[in-house]
Amino acid sequence: MIKRFVKWCVEFASWWNIRQTRKSLLFAVIVTLSVVATVMLSFPLNAQINLPPTPASELRGVWLTNIDSDVLFERDRLKGSLQRLDELNFNTIYPAVWNWGYTLYPSKVAAKVIGRSLDPTPGLKGRDILKEIVDVGHQKGLTVIPWFEFGFMAPADSLLAKNRPQWLTNRSDGTRILKEGKHNRVWLNPFRPEVQQFIQDLIVEIVRNYNIDGIQFDDHFGLPSELGYDAYTVALYKKEHRGQAPSKNFQDPEWVRWRANKITEFMKRVFKSIKATKKDCLVSVAPNPQRFSYDFFLADWQKWERLGIIEDLVLQIYRDDLNVFISELEYPEVKAAKSHIPVSVGIMAGLKNKSVPIQQIQTQVQKVRDRNFAGVSFFFYETLWNMSKEKPQERQAGFQKIFATPTTYPNLLGGWKPFS
């Protein structure tokens, strides 16, 4: 129909050219083009040229970490990486600031508690990478949301674990170490007041001292459900249960609920302290789907969202099976969260020993867009194009297709309001 209409317009212009002056011809062309535009806009969207849609605003993020990545360890490399992300129309970065039992920025809080103010990696010496990221990122128009990656977790051989053994929690058999890949991890007890104060002080220090746009937590802000049997926590449980000890079954529903509720109470405190320090600092959480987060990490983000103590949710859906990926997008708690706050989807771009094809990434992004999520974020920077079986140029071209044109970061606080 459009082709027939355009053909008529051309014939009309030719007819008009024979009969009118050049001045009249110009007027006719303007009128004709106006009519064409009006008619085309009145057609259904699928009758128009089929170009990939670019949302008016969309979160386009990537996590930057010092695990299996050296992007943070050299100033020019970091600057060049942020420049390339901007060129490829990304608009959000989540740089790690708390990993391996150390801060990645100079910290007076860490110096006092741990004995070191900064991660000892040589590439960080004499630098404040968070300030670098904020300064360069904002110059490039990137939204900067530091990521509190390790949460309550620490390496078993870290200074923090060695100097504060009373802060650690354990299983019912007294053992403390959990394996994460080949690494030995321990967990700070999130129920101890002095641990809570330390973590809260680190967070407030970042919010107060840096011009950040938000701060992000994930499942590590909870606790593996097999832990929590240390003397302090057991005594606290008994005090609140008329002397009754917690179940030896770490997945006992009441025992899970009690610990998850304690973590939720701490999350409330953290939210209030962030807002008291910087009102416009966004509180973001990037957890696994609710069932996993709650059952295995006691992180009840569904409740956090309902209580209004998180303002942005980036749901980690790291699935290769497309049907499973889609089903995770459509869980009731995800839809409920979308009706209240912006919800984006974390997509796996690859791991050190796992290459994810760019075609899979593109398909998953499209499925997210089809369901009107707020955006996507990729884990993690190095696997966007540096760690992949596909060539870097091919990968970058693939992301250029995903983010064909620039778009603004969503105003995540715009329509948000806490539940009463």
Image (cartoon, rainbow, N blue to C red):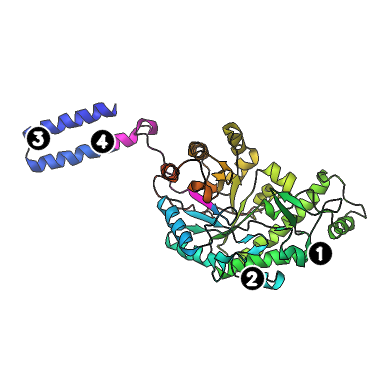
Foreground disc of the pair 3, 1: 1
Dot 1 falls on a residue whose secondary structure is: helix
Q: Is residue 160 found left or right of 9 in the rendered image?
A: right
Residue 223 or residue 271, whichever sits in front: 223
Residue at horizontal 14 percent and vertical 33 percent from the top: 13
Whether the magenta-drawn stretch holds residue 57 is answered as yes
Q: Mark 3 belongs to which amino acid?
A: Asn
> Does 246 sit above or below residue 15?
below
Specify the quadrant that holds the C terminus.
bottom right
Q: Mark 4 belongs to which amino acid?
A: Val
> Does 173 sit above or below residue 136?
above
Q: Earlier in the sequence, mark 4 or mark 2?
A: 4
> Does 203 sit above or below residue 228?
below
Q: Mark 1 belongs to which amino acid?
A: Gln
Mark 1 neighbour density, 10 Å: few (under 14) some (14–19) many (20 or more) = some
* Alpha-carbon span between mark 4 and mark 2: 65 Å
Residue, disc 3: 17
Q: Earlier in the sequence, mark 1 or mark 4?
A: 4
Q: Is residue 340 visible?
A: no
Q: Is residue 214 found left or right of 8 in the rendered image?
A: right
Q: Are marks 1 and 4 in contact (CB under 8 Å)?
A: no
Q: Which mark is residue 36?
A: 4
Q: Mark 2 belongs to which amino acid?
A: Ser
Q: Are marks 4 and 3 in contact (CB under 8 Å)?
A: no
Residue 160 or residue 375, whichever sits in front: 160
Dot 4 falls on a residue whose secondary structure is: helix
* Alpha-carbon span between mark 1 and mark 4: 75 Å
Dot 3 falls on a residue whose secondary structure is: helix
Residue 291 or residue 223, whichever sits in front: 223
Q: Which residues are magenta?
A: 38-62
* Alpha-carbon span between mark 1 and mark 2: 21 Å
Q: Is residue 224 found left or right of 245 in the rendered image?
A: left
